[in-house]
Image: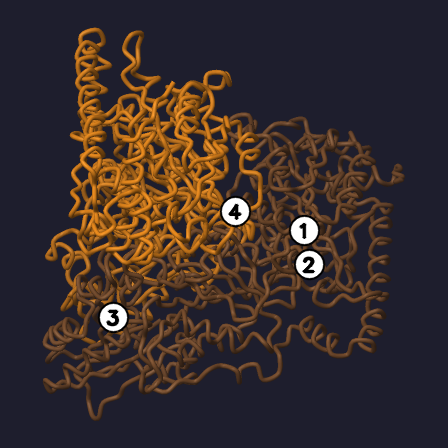
Chain colours: A brown, B orange
Amino acid sequence: MAHFDLTDATCIATIRTLAADVVGKANSGHPGAPMGMAPVAHVLATRFFNANPNNSKWFNRDRFVLSNGCALQYILLHLLGYKLSLDDLKAFRQIDSLTPGHPEANHTDGIEVTTGPLGQGFANGVGLAMAQAHLGAVYNRDKFDLINNYTYVFTGDGCLMEGVASEAASLAGHLQLGNLVVIYDDNHISIDGDTAIAFTEDVSQRFLSYGWQVIGVDDGDSDLEGIYNAIAAARKEKSKPTLIRLRTTIGYGSKLQGTHGVHGSPLKADDIQSLKSKFNFPSDQSFYVPSETYAAYRAIASRGAELEAAWTTLLGKYGEAYPKESAELTRRIAGKLPEGWEKSLPVYKPSDPAQASRKLSEIVLTAMTPKFPDLLGGSADLTGSNLTKAKGTVDFQPPSTGLGAYSGTYIRYGVREHAMGAIANGLAAYGGIIPFVGTFLNFVSYAAGAVRLSALSKHQVIWVATHDSIGLGEDGPTHQPVETVVHLRAIPNLDCWRPADGNETSASYLVAIRSRETPSVLSLSRQNLPNLEGSSIERAARGGYVLYEVEGKEDLTIVSSGSEVAIALEAASKLKQEGFKVRIVSLPCWSVFDKQDKEYKLSVLRSGAPILSLEALSTVGWQKYSHEQYGMQGWGASGPFQKVYEKFGITGTNIASVGKKVISFYQGRQVVSPLDKAL
Amino acid sequence: MAHFDLTDATCIATIRTLAADVVGKANSGHPGAPMGMAPVAHVLATRFFNANPNNSKWFNRDRFVLSNGCALQYILLHLLGYKLSLDDLKAFRQIDSLTPGHPEANHTDGIEVTTGPLGQGFANGVGLAMAQAHLGAVYNRDKFDLINNYTYVFTGDGCLMEGVASEAASLAGHLQLGNLVVIYDDNHISIDGDTAIAFTEDVSQRFLSYGWQVIGVDDGDSDLEGIYNAIAAARKEKSKPTLIRLRTTIGYGSKLQGTHGVHGSPLKADDIQSLKSKFNFPSDQSFYVPSETYAAYRAIASRGAELEAAWTTLLGKYGEAYPKESAELTRRIAGKLPEGWEKSLPVYKPSDPAQASRKLSEIVLTAMTPKFPDLLGGSADLTGSNLTKAKGTVDFQPPSTGLGAYSGTYIRYGVREHAMGAIANGLAAYGGIIPFVGTFLNFVSYAAGAVRLSALSKHQVIWVATHDSIGLGEDGPTHQPVETVVHLRAIPNLDCWRPADGNETSASYLVAIRSRETPSVLSLSRQNLPNLEGSSIERAARGGYVLYEVEGKEDLTIVSSGSEVAIALEAASKLKQEGFKVRIVSLPCWSVFDKQDKEYKLSVLRSGAPILSLEALSTVGWQKYSHEQYGMQGWGASGPFQKVYEKFGITGTNIASVGKKVISFYQGRQVVSPLDKAL
């Protein structure tokens, strides 16, 4: 039985008035939702939430996600004593502040995941809950319930309209994630006005259909006991995620409460004054925090410190009882990779048989998996095509399904690419896990919203993106990406790899796994690729290198990636027969190559002869690395892949002829490397 | 009461064996679903479907969408007598055939929308149904029920797992689309195996929660009457879309029926033989179509021809009774634009006040709307930000909501970007409608799967994509696109516009509306932009032009787009004061500029002096049009927009200084236009 008193009312009023002040000072932001969700935020933070504000990285902390990302989270972090001052709140939405427009992971102390783009946080929360279920199942032992935190997600109507949240909710129900509590701010208002205009579905029934527990709280504005009981019931239900449908009044306390007027615009000055008077706060003071509010929240902080201390003691005892598991767990918590993991990466000779790079990827995964428990992967229903399931792995499933166990490392995502990407962000954010996910490269685009947030949030997520060009053949243009790779190449802090053979595939995994704050997309072929003379893991790991060198001055360099490198070599060989010297540069990863020193880059893509790029994708962007470009000018075609390559002239014979055209055009011209530039 | 006899059984067996043969001959494809869905396909085609195979464009035809796109649709089209021969079926998945891997709109006679990428067809179907509801409400009159077709969608588990379908289903329920019948092939199998591994939600309950009618048919393999009654009941329900949950056996008749072994791989030769024997078909013949099957389907075709003839008569009488409406409707059916529509495009002088290009877009929409009923637009819950609602427009809503009418032209999409894009494809595919949709540019990425299909399918969809750079300011990097425009620029047959002022905004609408087979994305600013000396609709409509020319030989050309053009001008003016001659080129649309003649292009981006590109986005791709690039090297930042521009050096002062660096670097070098190339 919970007790609430005047202090609680004061705390809630503090959150509400701070929200108005924070948004008011910035003259930008969303005051309505924090004002409406202040009561549930307060009840959760003070009565249930296990975390240590002095160490925001304590591993077994409860995770909190504000899917409808707004100022509320900053206010809570400040009150709880995270590294966020009142001045930081005053700098809300200002340049270089700790309080940007929407919460960003790895930017502000205590923020788990980046939210704001709707639906993402919800799906991240599912990932965080899956991470707990997995690590708990792997490491917990009798009397050592080391990993047992909850994940709490606040969400609004907007998030619940997004498909990415629907996908994640369906999977969360299937996975029976009893550690996941989602609190739905049912305030009937979205930006365009009353939700009656576009969102009239029965949300509760929908979540019941997914297999969730659904609890309603009719007066989320003031029924603190109701809120308490709902959260308590949610925690009690161990085999289902819970949705608490909390009826609130957006902008509670404002003159415009309950309207979309308080959704995305600051309150007017007189409204803020009247709000403060309503709560018996000094109406002439801004950013006013009563001492009893601080006292109440700092008490929570000390409880958190005690919780962590007790947990650390338990971990110590666990180390005595289970030294092997403990060593592994503490390594993973510390974010270290298993000793010598890279030794398992396969190395190839040119005489090794040609294989598809998706198959080469499977070989890497199978080789790494036994000594690399951090890898938690899956596919969006394309396991047999993506080849993401390493031999011997068990499915991550609720035990009651009889299909696997929570300790399993292979996730069946279903046909849910966007949720898969966002869930992987949650898995990575939890810590101790390197998530990889699989689909056709073309359908990484379905998850673009999540992919950009991996990169912005520095979540190490590895995409196994197979069937990466017209080389997928028969499925045709609906499935053949031409624009996808350039999109990925333009995302900051994302490495997009297109390996040409076995060694380059190993190199892409090497760099992807070493890059602990960078997501990677491995763009892999459906068709077989020969192992190339001149490739090596070390060379490819630089992002680009001279695969085939000529003696003396070349007539042409062809720079290429992935499945087209072998075709470039074929063209070079044909041109050699005609007396032309043609170098071949393999450029599997632009962003990694860009990071090499200038001298190296200028030695690879050197001045003196024209450079022709070759890729069975859009040529957009290749102008940075070449003088001339050959690639797809439009959509692909359906047919056996060799025929499709022929149709678009991506054959040794045609590229040799294109190469001659290029050589002749530049004859007598001074040719400067495209990398020799002013900026 | 329906009657089914031996002929029906023969027809169904024909579809099943043809599916096995078609996929078998291609040695690629998905035989299982067509074999399982043969009964419902047959019942629908022969008992309900109103269409005229001799004129696949008859306006009031029922629309059919195979969301789980596969060979089934080709087989039906062939049997019904569309322009698809048995030889075309034999060329399934071969180069340049009419039968590519997945059905493509505007490629094969009778295909309405492109499917295969899962979930898209479902949402397209919602768009097709909305189009009927809208046009029916606008043009039907008492005794003139001219537009009253149904939309039938076949869907599988895969589509229903996709978020885009969830979003569309929720909206369809809200919109009470009684003309939409979705038949769910509940075969319990997806590529990874039994749906028990990832898809265990209660689909029926979910659709009930959306406000759909749900009807179950337990034996979809042989209960033809049950199927008939379900479709009849679906048609009868006028105020709800219907989901028919049809329990079928995937690959029915194969030795592997009911397993994922028949999902995505051809049947083995002996399995095909045994299948044919099972149905008493000659086991040694391929592509065998009994004459009674042809007879049954060709009878349907004559019924369709009669239906169209009667409809044409009715349309004639409508013309007498309602000459104005009739003229407009027939114009729209013919795909013609309203006479003189372009005269309403606003023209600006430099003295006109600075405005945000999102506002300029609103002015265009408001000016065009009164005489342009074809425009059917909306926003994903950002109406007040995207400024997509022209004054005076009525919401497209079911009358019972009291919030609008089906004749309304403004669609409240809710926060459902992906469905919005896919629904717009359906609206465009229906005919007579030019759909436009609105969201932040950043969230066009959520809809990437639909956008690429607009382009591939030649659907004219116009995206009003506002808040298009760091210029959105306070919302910060989570909402600031840096990679989005280059992604869109790399999509074939898509025009991505980034207008710099009022005239360029008008130009972007001019070209976007004239391009009847090309989608466009208008990338628009949140912040105010001055009207530029030298811009005009005609010049901007060429995609790129010299905005500011110098006398004699220039020292530098700055090429820019959108909100940065005015900054480039500022830099030029500063450099002028220092004695440098700087030309300014505005390049609002790459793909349109690329289509101009080479002489023109070389006159705009000419040899002789270096060209520097400037855009507050990723520089990827600008190397095609410039020697040096200035733009975003990483993510944006949260803050007032002027401060954000300053932080990243995108100011007149800094660009002037960058320009000097570029001028000095190229001094004494021979500078050739980046467009002067061999290929």
- Image height of B529 relative to A113, above or below: above
Q: Which residue is mark 2?
A: A133
Q: CA distance from mark 1 to mark 4?
A: 17 Å
Q: Quadrant of the N terminus of chain B?
A: top left
Q: CA distance from mark 3 to mark 1?
A: 47 Å
Q: Position of residue A679 (x, y in %)?
A: 35, 71
- Image height of B148 relative to A312, above or below: above
Q: Which residue is mark 4?
A: A164
On whether disc 1 and disc 4 are found on a single subunit, the reply is yes
Residue B368 visible (yes or no): no
Marks 2, 4: nearer the viewer: 2
Q: Residue furthest bottom?
A: A551
Q: Residues within 10 Å of mark 1 (few under 14, many from 20)?
A: many
Q: CA distance from mark 3 to mark 4?
A: 35 Å
Q: Which residue is mark 1?
A: A177
Q: Position of residue A595 (x, y in %)?
A: 43, 76
- Image height of A401 relative to B15, above or below: below
